[in-house]
Image: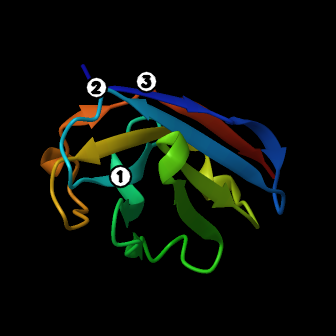
Amino acid sequence: QVQLVESGGGLVQAGGSLRLSCAASGLTFGTYTMSWFRQAPGKERKFVAGISWRGGNTDYADSVKGRFTISRDNAKNTVYLQMNSLESEDTAVYFCTVRAHWDIATSPYAYDYWGQGTQVTVSS
């Protein structure tokens, strides 16, 4: 059974940084991508960043390009999201997700498993 456990969320002032982690277990398929989505209150879940597990390809939402960096440690089955220059608009619950496919998708419906989410709050 696939499990994704996020950590690293919290409260930070605008301009600050946070690093989210997502530890995956139970992954039995050989090719998969992992991504981060976020959801603010009353809004739909949106793609933030994704990384292909074997190839190292990455993709980012325009709103976070240049500020966020996604990376992974294959030995630890963990994906990270380094978030710098945080803005109040980044406030949301951040979800880690995985899909058994080689390419990075930006629709949440393309993903197979989800973590429970971690709250990120940026105060202005």
Is residue 36 placed above or below 84 in the rendered structure? above
Q: Nearer the viewer, mark 3 or mark 1?
A: 1
Q: Find disc 2 in the rendering and name its residue.
A: 2
Give the amino acid at mark 1. Answer: Met
Are the two marked residues, 3 and 1, in contact with CB atoms closer than 8 angstroms? no
Rounded to the nearest angstrom, the CA distance separating label 1 from label 2 is: 13 Å
Residue 49 in the image: state x and y as whole percent.
43, 62
Residue 24 in the image: state x and y as whole percent.
42, 34
Is residue 112 placed above or below 61 in the rendered structure? above
Is residue 45 placed above or below 35 in the rendered structure? above
Residue 10, by quadrant, is top right
Residue 34 in the image: state x and y as whole percent.
35, 52
Residue name at image x 52 percent, y 56 percent: 72
Q: Is residue 13 left or right of residue 41?
A: right
| Residue 44 appears in view | no
Residue name at image x 59 percent, y 55 percent: 81
Sequence-wise first label, 3 or 1: 1
